[in-house]
Amino acid sequence: MKIYSHENQMLHHPQSYFSRGKMREPQEKPERLTELLKAPEALDLKVTTAKDIGIAPILAVHDLGYVDFLKNAYSEWIAVDEDMGKEVQTTIYMPHSNDGLGILAKAAKYQADGSAPIGEHSWTSIYWSAQTALNAADVLLNDDGGQNNIQVCLTRPAGHHARKNAAGGFCYLNNAAIIAQHLRQKFQKIAIIDTDMHHGQGIQEIFYDRNDVLYTSVHGSPINFYPVVAGHEHERGEGDGYGYNVNFPMPHGVDESEFFQFVDKAIETVKLFNPDVIVHVLGFDVYKDDPQAKCAVSTQGFKTLAQKLKALDKPVIVLVEGGYCIEKLNENLQAFISGFTAEKIINNK
Ligand SMILES: [Zn+2]
């Protein structure tokens, strides 16, 4: 198993966000990564510092204008001769019929909701989060011995809500989509299985008309729950992609065994697709005490989840995304990793 991270991911430090009628205290804080990094340390596993693979794989998914906005929005924002606060934030979303004249118009073009503020150092973290994920993909592109079948990327900020050309829901660059696209250079079929508490509508949107990248997601029903406008069962893809987008929205309040019934259905979908590589979007916000949880997965449940993925016997790249019960991230990640390492020992006999 290889684990990746980069310290530059600590720099993004949101101060506030607007959601469901009020300004809220950010849950997506740098301390999340500090806690996640304690898990490999406790298990005596090495964490590889991600190297720079460049901007090209990012631009293979995201529009240049949007990436340019993420990179330069903060400096343009503070250059305006008016106090607009220390973070780029908007309450207007106008992706079309908007020439982006002025930073407020650009924010209205590229920020889909109030929960993706951009501060002074956000771009550095956003960029290195994508690079952290890309490092795992690059190993598979260059690997000839199958030595890196399980790779875990500790990524922050997360990616699955990011659209091709818009930020939202704490997400800026869609890491899962970026690495799926990057992997297509060598591999024919990529499956993305998303078990974060929230539906990854950004991934769905990016691959909606394609049959080379399967997207299947287990998440809380989007009725009155983020991302609110996507994640229903009837959203199945379009054109060539019809049938390659498979959503399993869970009623709010399900227990762990019900969660795994949905996960098993998603895994069956992955098996039918028979991918060359699996990308797993792992959210610890399904944990029973997480402030975002609408289901109740236990710490041991994360071990079970990893064992189910390991049993598929395919290369897996795990992207750690949501998870806001910060004091339990270390323990929950340790449990998840142990689901892979225990299996590995059995395989080596
Ligand atoms: Zn989430």
Image (cartoon, grey):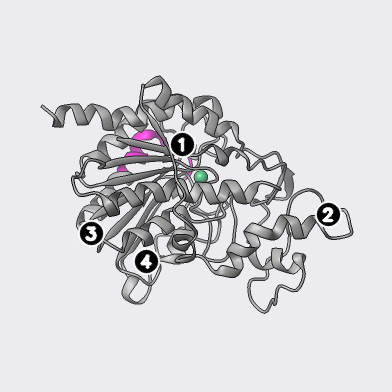
The three-letter amino acid code for the residue at tag 3 is: Phe
Work out whether mark 3 precedes mark 2 in sequence or the reverse, and give the earlier one.
Answer: 2
Residue 15 drawn at (x, y percent):
72, 41
Query: What whole-number distance in Å separates the C-alpha atoms at marks 1 and 4?
Result: 26 Å
Q: Please give the range of residues in magenta.
A: 252-261
Query: Helix or strand or loop: what does disc 2 sit on?
Result: loop
Query: Helix or strand or loop: what does disc 3 sit on?
Result: helix
Q: Quadrant of the N terminus?
A: top left
Mark number, residue 273: 3
The three-letter amino acid code for the residue at tag 4 is: Arg
**Within the magenta stretch, is there residue 45?**
no
Identify the residue under disc 4. Answer: 236
Q: Residue furthest right?
A: 82
The reply to whether dot 3 and dot 2 touch (C-beta < 8 Å) is no
The three-letter amino acid code for the residue at tag 2 is: Met
Work out whether mark 4 precedes mark 2 in sequence or the reverse, and give the earlier one.
Answer: 2
Query: Does residue 306 sit above or below 105 in this rendering?
Result: above
Circle nearer the viewer, 3 or 4: 3
Work out whether mark 1 precedes mark 2 in sequence or the reverse, and give the earlier one.
Answer: 2
Residue 116 drawn at (x, y percent):
64, 52
Identify the residue under disc 2. Answer: 84
Q: Nearer the viewer, residue 147 or 168?
A: 147
Q: Residues within 10 Å of mark 4 (few under 14, many from 20)?
A: some
